[in-house]
Amino acid sequence: MEKEKLEEIILKFMPDAEIATDKQFLTAEVKNDQIHALAKFLKNTKETLFDYLFCESAVDFGDHFMMVYHLDSTTYRHQVVIKTKITDRENPVVDSVCDIWMGAEYHEREIFDLFGIGFNNHPDLRKIFLDNDWVGFPLRKDYTDTVNIVER
């Protein structure tokens, strides 16, 4: 599918989405409370069928987090990136997409463990790498490395 057609489909469903394109991806940024609806729409709509979440990640920009979802349609062989900003650093939360793509369960547990971002409606949100008594979130910009796990 051409990026222009995909942009048209997304904007028809979610008119306030911010769209950007580069050589590889069309990217749609939406509000935090819209990300689940957009994800579900993109997976279940006949023209898009984004049935594969091949990467779900978080980025810490210092003053906010960005959740980034890379999607692929194995039927149509097109890709899209959707993302949302989380501005609450004290209690960062976004809706889980585990009910849409089962593979998101482990991505979200990793993000929870290393960034401290919570996921509403996640079926098993618990640490995946760090010990239960670990203090802090190592991938945050404001993390203080008290055990010297990073050599400088």
Image: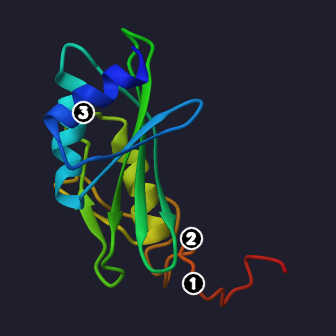
Question: How is colour applied across the structure in the image?
Answer: rainbow
* Of the image marks 1 and 3, the number of the one nearer the N terminus: 3
Asked if the residue at tag 2 contacts the one at tag 1, i.e. Cβ–Cβ closer than 8 Å, the answer is: yes
At horizontal 50% and vertical 72% (from top left) the residue drawn is 131
Q: Quadrant of the N terminus?
A: top left
- Secondary structure, mark 2, is loop
Residue 79 percent across, percent down from the top left: 44, 25
Q: Quadrant of the C terminus?
A: bottom right
User: Which amino acid type corresponds to the residue marked 2 in the rendered image?
Assistant: Leu
Kindly identify which residue carries mark 1: 143
Q: Nearer the viewer, residue 95 or 24?
A: 24
Q: What's the CA distance linking mark 1 and mark 2?
A: 7 Å
Kindly identify which residue carries mark 2: 139
Mark 2 crowdedness (10 Å alpha carbons): few <14, some 14-19, many ≥20:
some
At horizontal 44% and vertical 18% (from top left) the residue drawn is 78
Name the disc covering residue 33, or none.
none
At horizontal 61% and vertical 89% (from top left) the residue drawn is 144
Kindly identify which residue carries mark 3: 10
User: Which amino acid type corresponds to the residue marked 1 in the rendered image?
Assistant: Tyr
Residue 28 percent across, percent down from the top left: 35, 43
Q: What's the CA distance linking mark 1 and mark 3?
A: 36 Å
User: Which amino acid type corresponds to the residue marked 3 in the rendered image?
Assistant: Ile
Pick out the residue farthest to the right: 152
Looking at the picture, does residue 14 appear above or below residue 128? Answer: above
Q: Is residue 82 left or right of residue 60?
A: left
